[in-house]
Image (spheres, grey):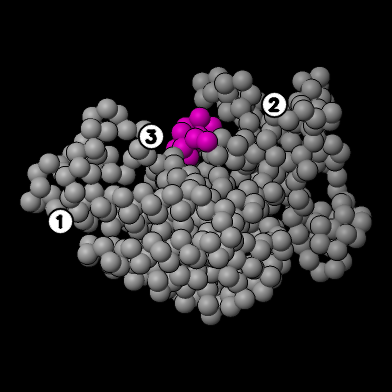
Amino acid sequence: MTTVENLFTAALGLHQPWHVDEVKFSLDEGEIHFNVACGEKRLPCPVCGAGDQPVHDRLDRTWQHLHFFQYRAFIHAKVPRIACTCGKTTQMEVPWARAGSGFTLLMEALAVMLCKTMAVAQVARLLSVNEQRLWRMITSLVQSARDQESYTEVKHIGVDEKHVGRLGFVTLFHDADERRVIFDMKGRDAKVFETFVKDIQAHEGDPSQIEVVSMDLSRAYQAGATKHLPQAVQCFDRFHLVKLVNEAVDQVRRAEVKTEPSLKGLRWGLFKDPGKWNQAQGADMYDLNRNRLKTGRAWRMKEAFRDIVEFSNHTPERTRYLITHWISWARRSRLEPFKRLGATFKKHLEGIVSGFTCGVTNATAESINATVQGAIVRAHGFRTYRNLMAIVYLTVGKLTHLPAPPFQHRQTVQFS
């Protein structure tokens, strides 16, 4: 080998029996090619480990590597297949790439790092890679990493739905303690819990140790949790309850604005924190309460419920008293949306009280939903549900078996 071949052998982190045999540079195509050779005629069997087995033949393979300066880099090798006495003829694994991959390990690590924060299409252009090849790489790496995840410590989970355009509704399960997505499934019916239980068992988890399930008031979710996680306390997320109260206020406003034109333009002031009103909104809300309109009463009920939520560190007994008192007020309010909501809250009182006292909320789910929405934007052109969820797990799955960033300092550079 010349000095150049020795230099690139060391730069690529190659060890015996592999070495760079030839380097070709094409300025017109903007590419640099490394021909890597293994001259051994007898090698250990990759299956049984028996040593000194004959090489049956060699197969031409190519992998895309990290750019060298501004040039695309490729590794080419004739990979030996070993004919072993165990009866199998098996291709030797190369130390710089996964089996079946067309990219080196460092190239995959760089792609994973970039796809966490950039659109896949942008990463494909940056790395000069076909976008669909990049999607296949990402989904394969994410699936492999998720298969190795252990959910033995999962005790508190949150369940929430997300509408994803043409794909419809998706149910996401998250570990409330670790703040990570641990399962996803199309749909939002009771069957998602059955599939979740099977999945967590496949990841060494124990469904019987799940103590708390935080969710909204979906009947399907309640039925699924009751059947498949009967030991878990069902907590109805208080932030979802606030959303329902806000919707009731808006229903009252929309019905009354037909006869009270002064309510036009007040929608955002009704839902905004009073401490953040501007001068005009403050004046409008003052007039609203002075005129004794139904919408004013609805707003006061909404603020009373928000006070209960904001100061939610009460004892279960005190929380039950406050919620029961608010339900009674809502049912006597002569406001149909609040009468219906009061009846709903009364029906689910125990789960609502648990939601205030169990310490688990869907705030994580809402944060995850925002991240998922960002992933949808970054993954425009994801085409399939599998691609989308690969990006979701990549960004909010906290997977521990993904390739490490390729630019970490190493005393010795090697592919392993």
Tell me the mark number nearer the camera, choosing from 1 and 2: 1
Residue 318 picture location, percent across and down: 53, 61
Screen quadrant of the C terminus: top right
What's the amino acid at mark 2? Val
Q: How many marks?
A: 3
Can you give x and y, in whole percent of width and height, for residue 292 in the image? 19, 49
Residue 186: horizontal and vertical position, in percent? 44, 64
Q: Nearer the viewer, residue 13 or 359?
A: 359
Q: Could you tell me how far apart the alpha carbons at marks 2 and 3 are, in whole angstroms?
A: 68 Å
Which of the 4 quarters of the picture holds residue 167?
A: bottom left
Q: Main secondary structure of the magenta part?
A: helix
Q: Is residue 44 visible?
A: yes
Q: Looking at the figure, which quarter contains the N terminus?
A: top right
Earlier residue among tags 3 and 1? 1
Above or below for 99 versus 284? below
In the structure shown, which secondary structural element does the residue marked by tag 2 occupy? strand
Q: Nearer the viewer, mark 2 or mark 3?
A: 3
Which numbered tag is attached to residue 275?
3
- From the image, tell me which residue sits under label 2: 23
Q: Which SS class for mark 1?
A: helix
5 vs 379, nearest the viewer: 379
- 134 magenta-colored: no
Which of the two labelled residues, at mark 2 and mark 3, occupies the earlier sequence position?
2
Q: Residue furthest bottom?
A: 227
Q: Is residue 121 a member of the stretch shown in magenta? A: yes
User: What residue is shown with label 1?
Assistant: 255
Residue 397 appears in the rendering: no
Tell me the SS state at disc 3: helix
Which is more toward the observer, 347 or 58?
A: 347
The residue located at (34%, 52%) in the rendering is 302
Q: What range of the chain is rendered magenta?
A: 117-127
